Image: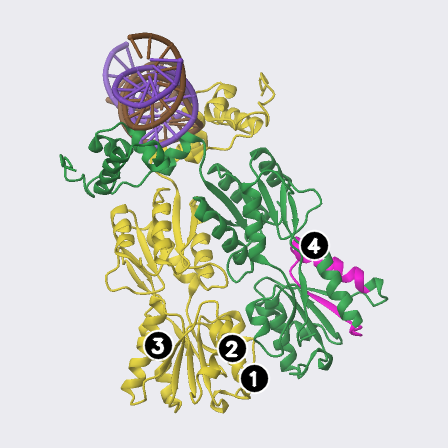
Chain colours: A yellow, B green, C brown, D purple
Amino acid sequence: MSSEVTDPGTGPTGAAPTLSEVAKRAGVSSITVSRVVRMPDLVAPETRARVEQAMRDLGYIPNLVAGALASARTNSVGVLVPTIANSIFADTVQGLSDKLEPLGFSVILAQSRYDAAREDRMLAALLSRRPEAIIMVGSPATEEGSRLLRNARIPIVETWDLPANPIDAVAGFDNYKAGVAVAKHLVAQGRKQLAFIGGDDPRGTRRWFGFRDEALANGLAEPRRLILDRKDSGSVAAHARLPDVDAVFAANDAHAIGFMSGLRKAGLLRDGPASAQPVAVIGLGDLEMARLISPTLSTISVHGDAIGRTAATLTLERDGERRIDLGFELVLRDSG
Amino acid sequence: MSSEVTDPGTGPTGAAPTLSEVAKRAGVSSITVSRVVRMPDLVAPETRARVEQAMRDLGYIPNLVAGALASARTNSVGVLVPTIANSIFADTVQGLSDKLEPLGFSVILAQSRYDAAREDRMLAALLSRRPEAIIMVGSPATEEGSRLLRNARIPIVETWDLPANPIDAVAGFDNYKAGVAVAKHLVAQGRKQLAFIGGDDPRGTRRWFGFRDEALANGLAEPRRLILDRKDSGSVAAHARLPDVDAVFAANDAHAIGFMSGLRKAGLLRDGPASAQPVAVIGLGDLEMARLISPTLSTISVHGDAIGRTAATLTLERDGERRIDLGFELVLRDSG
DNA sequence: TCGCCTCATGTTAGCGCTAACATTAAACCA
DNA sequence: TGGTTTAATGTTAGCGCTAACATGAGGCGA
């Protein structure tokens, strides 16, 4: 009851208060304070109350850096994405972080910017923080990156694809099949001159291969492939470079919408249904926008947040299936 | 020249190799290895080469957790955003991380999900990792959060707004003025029945006040304010709840585009210029999409990535102006 | 030749915490 | 009653690294 106020708090004078300062103030040993923080059930209620009061008095905030070193558990996961801005990967980061934060894990975020050297640097930087797992979009671009991850002896989750020889766990979908599905649909619609626009990153390329192979398998001419620079704002101009095509698969919704904008300028966009479109456009990602614009965008819907949540689960559970195919859906609307 | 291969690498057998294992293999003391990692210039070239070889042999990855504890420098910054998915805050995170990663800082990311209690928990979680600075969107929602940050004695950067009494530094713009600018423009266009749609978070509310005050100051009726749930997919339905309005300011581009979709269904959207629109629509954020859809979206353009970069600079430089107004621009296109 | 400086490397102690193993007192039981 | 369990707390050592302060060898000017 009587709190022995020997010192009214070191206050925000000097450095942050430590466990042992709290311990001294509460008249217990530091390990008892540590227990109050981590396993309060092991401490008698009165002692606990005294310690909690001391923590409040001093404004104690546990130092997880020291705790991590002592316990060899950092309670953090490293997350590597190509980019976080304007990208569907943000959904994945949100999904995994929603799952991990309540469990006391922190997310250390790094961006590779689609640059293999930077990716390796970021992987090394992440690993030097000793995360308990690494979740990344795609697979390491270099042998060196792969080696780093293999030697780390922690759960590694590759996402957004289904690599043939994963390092450890996988949560993604089959990008090749996505390309196939789009081509199949366009062929069924009677389209003849197909084209693919998008980047040349591994996943985009896999989509392209599926798209092309299926077109060829159906007796169509080899589709054109337009590799757009990442900054190539929405590929508005792409249409000029693709005369005569009657169907386009864009590697993401932003490119698709940009392309549609080019079509509109050329008078080749209708507000009617897919069958009325001179040029069919299919995107990938299923942004919220896709169903709000006119004509509504047909697209391959992938569950970015589910990928994140699944990846989080895979980092936490070491056993069970380590290769989760979250699939995709071809959502047909008015654009193609 | 002759590398004395006493032990061909502990290999990926047991735990990660430590500084002193590298030291033993290279025949130096651990501090020398530490120097090779951190200040290579202080080490003689031959010694350095020997140490580097040992590091390679063992696959040594420095343990920054231990280094941080010993040096009291974590080389990390905590970043708190309301949400990262589908949000313009992703630009800010990208901006700051692009600036900080090359300097060896890691980004620890946390989401508050617009929840004050979660925000406080996340702030405490971030601080327990002893970041060297905290960058957050907005200001702490609670007194407790504020106190935590004030006591942390590290640079704190509040962004996306210009709070009257910032904790430390600020990089943002005046949300109130943004609302004023939009109302002013709509009034000049001859619009009479204004409405505001968006969330009721602090920044959205500030925009609303500016918007309302300016409308009233111009003799218009008090604008309607429709508070949308965050999940309220694009506010397609909002139009039904706002009959008779002839101008709408949406707190973000997604809401604006959703509202336009509702207008289109109601036959109230033209492909012509702003003057031809029965209902003017202005967004905020200037997503890439804004200029690709039809009609193109008029919007308040804010520089999310510049906010991030500026925030990063403010964490690194303790002196100089600590309140940076990045401004905004009213970008007029065809929607209003 | 001596004192002094510089360069390269080493020694020592400790960052703030936790794992693992005491220790003590009370509770329990046959 | 004495041994054994259980609950509550403490002691000790050390996680892997770095700051701060030695140490020693060689260079160098007078």
Disc 4 residue crowd, few under 14, some 14–19, many 20+, Cα 10 Å: many
Q: Is residue B213 within the magenta segment?
A: yes
The residue indicated by pointer 4 is B174
Going 45% across and 30% down the picture, which residue do you hit? A36
Residue A135: percent from the left, percent from the top?
36, 54
Where residue A59 sits, quadrant-wise, is top right
Q: Which amino acid, by three-letter code, is at mark 2?
A: Val
- Judge by depth and name the residue closer to the eye, A256 or A27: A256
Circle 2 marks a residue in which chain? A
Question: Disc 3 sits on a residue from what chain?
Answer: A
Give residue B254's position: percent from left, percent from top.
Answer: 59, 68
Foreground disc of the pair 2, 4? 2
Q: Which numbered disc flags the more N-terminal residue, 3 or 2? A: 3
Say what amino acid the circle numbered 1 marks. Answer: Lys
Name the side, left or right, on which B235 lies relative to A193: right
**Disc 4: host chain:** B
The numbered disc on residue A236 is: 2
Q: State left or right for residue B18 relative to residue B265.
A: left
Q: Secondary structure under badge 4?
A: loop
Q: Which residue does the numbered mark 3 point to in the structure image?
A: A179
Cα separation, mark 1 vs mark 2, equals: 9 Å
Judge whether residue B25 can be spotted in this image.
yes
Do badges 3 and 2 share one subunit? yes
Residue span colored magenta: B189-215
Per the image, the residue denoted by label 1 is A265
CA separation, marks 4 and 3? 45 Å
Q: Sequence-wise, which precedes: disc 1 or disc 3?
A: 3
Q: Nearer the viewer, residue A335 or B66?
A: B66
